[in-house]
Image: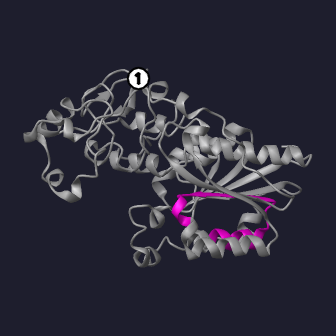
Amino acid sequence: MPVQVVDLFCGVGGLTRGLLDAGLDVVAGFDIDSTCQFTYEHNNNVDYHLRNIREVTGEEIDHLYDENVTRVLVGCAPCQPFSQMRFKLRDANERDEKYDLLLEFGRLIEETHPTIISMENVPQIRETNVYNQFLEILRRNNYHIDARVIFCPEYGIPQTRRRFVLVGSLLGPIHIIEPTHDKDDVHVRDFIADLPPIVAGQVHPNDPMHRSASLSERNLQRIQASIPGGTWRDWPEELRCECHRKESGQTYSSVYGRMTWEQIGPTITTQFYNYGTGRYGHPEQDRALSLREGALLQTFPPEYNFINPDTNFVFSDIARHIGNAVPVRLGEVIGMTIIDHLVEHNIEF
């Protein structure tokens, strides 16, 4: 009995690419963002369904699977309503139009009864009503569940990122695979050190994704005064920002920071190309991360193509796609978890 996967909220395909790399057959991806379609289909050879998940029916999902297959449904609903920065504003979160999209995933699980399901999000989602309602859907549909917060470097992802991963199965108990790496052996150097040098605002002629944002003269002076792993406190007084002089700004020590070659990198967000939004300064070069470097730290393959030749290049769109993606390696870990479970139950894939 072959295995087929449908990926909801697929974006540009970080999760899909990881599942494919693990050896699973992904037959469709769903997302509402039209700017993701080229990247998803071009790199993964999987059909992209440009749909609002609220309008997708279980019958539509059912028709995507072949007959007599083990069906897997995965979905990483948008994490913005549950981010650490916004989580303090709980009422505002619940007013966010994306807040209840996890329940749309739950609805489709209930309508299609896939054999295996998986979701991924930020750890804070566990403290929400919407997550408790999602759990109730899984329990009343008899899913065995394993759910835990994982530290990404322990699975070979070079970011100080913690993600919540849930897997469920109708076959029996399922377990997320144990860590695959020693976190102390995962370094920024291993992912981006081989790229050729560029300066701020430059595009490398051999890779249109290896381009970095421009820097103002003042920010160029700041990054030149920054040391790997240091803070803005290393700067001369005249280079410091007004916010750093306020008590409220004293705790944001990683802003305007340089990464360190032999350490783990920061969590890659949609603003990773912006030197002033985190520790996104290159360890040696006087610039922030390039788009390609951000993608590599998200463990996308070096050849992953994010640029649609038929549309205008929008720097911020591509950065958003990269920052919002599930790290490819995390997708592979989820795929390996599913495969181990299938093997345990003598199901071929």
Three-letter residue code for mark 1: Leu
Q: Which residues are magenta?
A: 104-125
In the displayed structure, 249 sits above or below 124; it is above
Q: Residue furthest left?
A: 238
Q: Within the image, what quadrant is residue 18 found in?
A: top right
Question: Depth check: 204 or 174 in front?
Answer: 174
Side (left or right) of 292 relative to 40: left
Q: Within the image, what quadrant is residue 196 found in?
A: top left
Question: Depth check: 240 or 342 in front?
Answer: 240
Is residue 307 a member of the stretch shown in magenta? no
| Mark 1 nearby-residue class (10 Å; few <14, some 14–19, many ≥20) | few
- Taking the spot 53% from the left edge, 53% from the top edge, the residue there is 11
Is residue 114 a member of the stretch shown in magenta? yes
Whole-percent x, y for residue 238 in the image: 7, 40
Whole-percent x, y for residue 80 in the image: 45, 63
Q: How is the image coloured?
A: one colour
- Taking the spot 67% from the left edge, 37% from the top edge, the residue there is 21
Q: Which residue is mark 1?
A: 195
Specify whether residue 136 is in view.
Answer: yes
Q: Residue furthest right?
A: 346
Side (left or right) of 167 relative to 253: right
- Taking the spot 75% from the left edge, 61% from the top edge, the residue there is 145
Whole-percent x, y for residue 206 in the image: 39, 23
Side (left or right) of 325 relative to 230: right
Whole-percent x, y for residue 14 in the image: 56, 45
Which quarter shows the C terminus? top right
Specify whether residue 45 is in view.
Answer: no
Instruction: Report helix, strand or loop for mark 1.
Output: loop
